């Protein structure tokens, strides 16, 4: 097939889950199909030879959004109050990308267009002669609903409520506009089918590169060190760390006074870095070249996520490294993990802290949990399997082409 893949960013560096999932899927699909990767490009990362690892042709579309925290950013937020689009989508509108996709899609040389995440869909035109697929890594409206649910002050609650309702309306419309939707868990499949009335949905599993996430045995493990990994410019991860540092870590340190938490991930906001520095036992690394030494040095992996959607690749990465994992149910949702055998699940600060203490103080239990989870992901979670699921699903032209032009929902693009 000739696949036209639409995205809002280049994939390198591979520093967040969405990039990693797309990279691994495309790397497998590229072995069989011809991939043209059309993406917005702000110039902050170089378009280099690494793009050839996941596509045959990269087409960067110059794009410049206001820097977060700048006057232009706040002006856009203010103007978005009067838009029917949520800001997370409206900020990616690009006439140049829309023209590029329209031209290539109409050329007759494209077998399928894949819109990767909901965000670039604002630039995907209606009426393309090729089948179209929306790849939903998350149910975006669910994330914004959870933002609203955990927000503390009235202003934040009102803002998140408005963005959630806008996102839900747009996501429902867009899921029905495409001829096929791909999701990453049965939870998301059921939600999109139930809430949005979408029938043509395929599910692809979450994977892990187990040859990369593998302990080398050269980094000594510290008995009372805990670790979290994730992009710290993502608000759900910031919320998770505030929740952990404020409400969970103090409870852990009551029983294990020398317990520490290392927060590993790109672009932590300065306010979070300064605040964490004042908390006993907390280390915020910022961007690192390699997360694996930080993971191998730790005894327990924590994922106290309260806001999220889709599935968390970081859980499988921790498991592949042999780490026992304590997660909230939101953090682990959508993954084929067995509570008590592959992972420990806890939601309240008291239960989460107790689970972490048990693993920090019971080395045999921690070792057994980590080893069992590592075996599970190595046997069941290869990226080749996930890519094959996409390749053989109804998202491919052999399924989608039968519906081309035949089952339009009548909705219009976000334009």
Image: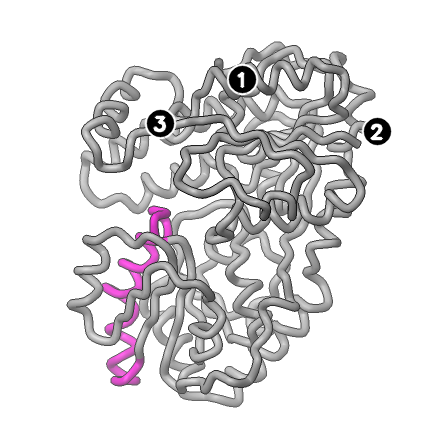
- Check contact, mark 1 vs mark 2: CB within 8 A: no
Closer to the camera in the image, 196 or 14? 14
- Secondary element at tag 3: helix
Asked if the stretch drawn in magenta spans residue 116, the answer is no
Q: Residues within 10 Å of mark 3 (few under 14, many from 20)?
A: some
Q: Nearer the viewer, mark 3 or mark 1?
A: 1
Q: Residue at x 62, y 45 (%)?
A: 184
Rendering coords of residue 256 (x, y %):
30, 84
Q: Is residue 214 visible?
A: yes
Label 2 element class:
helix
Q: Please name the residue shown 62% across and 10% down the image.
A: 410
Locate the N terminus and report the quarter of the image it occupies. top right
Task: State whether residue 131 is above or below residue 158.
Answer: above
Q: Nearer the viewer, mark 1 or mark 2?
A: 1
Q: Which badge, 1 or 2, comes first in the chain's sequence?
A: 1
Spatial CA span between label 3 and label 1: 18 Å
Residue 193 visible to an observer of this rendering: no
The circle drawn on residue 204 is: none
Query: Sequence order check: which comes first, mark 3 or mark 2?
Result: 3
CA distance for labels 3 and 2: 36 Å
Label 3–label 1 contact, CB within 8 A: no
Task: Identify the residue under disc 1.
Answer: 98
Picture disc at residue 398: 2
Number of numbered discs overlaid on the protein picture? 3
Tell me the residue at 45%/71% (across/down).
Answer: 301
Q: Nearer the viewer, residue 153 or 18?
A: 18
Q: Which residues are magenta?
A: 232-259
Report the predominant secondary structure element of the magenta stretch: helix
Q: Residues within 10 Å of mark 2 (few under 14, many from 20)?
A: few
Q: State the image coordinates of residue 366 (x, y, percent, origin top left).
A: 51, 82
> What residue did someone put label 3 on?
87
Callout 1: SS: helix
């Amino acid at each position: 097939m000739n696949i036209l893949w639409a995205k809002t960013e280049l994939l390198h560096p591979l520093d967040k889950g969405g990039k990693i999932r797309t990279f691994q899927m495309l790397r497998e699909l590229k072995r069989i199909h011809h991939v043209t990767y059309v993406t917005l490009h702000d110039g902050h990362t170089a378009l280099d030879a690494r793009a050839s690892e996941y596509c045959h042709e990269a087409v960067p579309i110059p794009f410049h959004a206001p820097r977060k925290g700048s006057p232009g950013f706040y002006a856009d937020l203010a103007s978005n109050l009067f838009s029917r689009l949520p800001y997370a989508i409206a900020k990616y509108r690009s006439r140049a990308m829309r023209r590029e996709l329209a031209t290539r899609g109409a050329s007759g040389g494209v077998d399928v267009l894949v819109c990767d995440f909901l965000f670039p869909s604002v630039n995907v035109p209606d009426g393309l002669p090729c089948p179209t697929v929306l790849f939903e890594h998350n149910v975006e409206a669910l994330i914004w609903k959870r933002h609203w649910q955990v927000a503390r002050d009235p202003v934040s609650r009102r803002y998140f409520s408005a963005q959630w309702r806008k996102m839900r309306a747009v996501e429902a419309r867009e899921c029905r506009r495409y001829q096929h939707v791909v999701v990453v868990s049965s939870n998301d499949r059921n939600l999109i089918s139930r809430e949005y009335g979408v029938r043509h949905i395929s599910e692809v599993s979450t994977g892990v590169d187990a040859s990369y996430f593998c302990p080398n045995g050269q980094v000594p493990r510290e008995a009372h060190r805990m670790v979290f990994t994730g992009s710290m410019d993502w608000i759900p991860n910031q919320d998770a760390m505030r929740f952990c540092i404020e409400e969970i870590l103090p409870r852990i340190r009551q029983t294990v006074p020398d317990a520490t938490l290392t927060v590993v991930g790109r672009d932590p906001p300065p306010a979070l870095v300064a605040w964490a520095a004042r908390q006993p036992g907390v280390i915020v690394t910022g961007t690192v070249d390699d997360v694996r030494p930080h993971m191998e040095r730790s005894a327990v992996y924590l994922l106290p996520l309260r806001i999220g959607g889709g599935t968390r690749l970081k859980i499988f990465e921790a498991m592949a490294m042999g780490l026992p994992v304590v997660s909230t149910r939101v953090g682990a949702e959508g993954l084929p993990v067995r509570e008590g055998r592959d992972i420990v699940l806890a939601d309240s600060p008291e239960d989460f802290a107790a689970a972490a203490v048990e693993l920090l103080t019971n080395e045999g239990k921690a070792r057994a949990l980590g080893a069992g989870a590592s075996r599970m992901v190595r046997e069941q979670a290869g990226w080749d399997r996930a890519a094959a699921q996409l390749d053989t699903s109804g998202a491919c032209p052999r399924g989608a082409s039968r519906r081309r032009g035949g089952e339009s929902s009548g909705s219009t693009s976000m334009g």
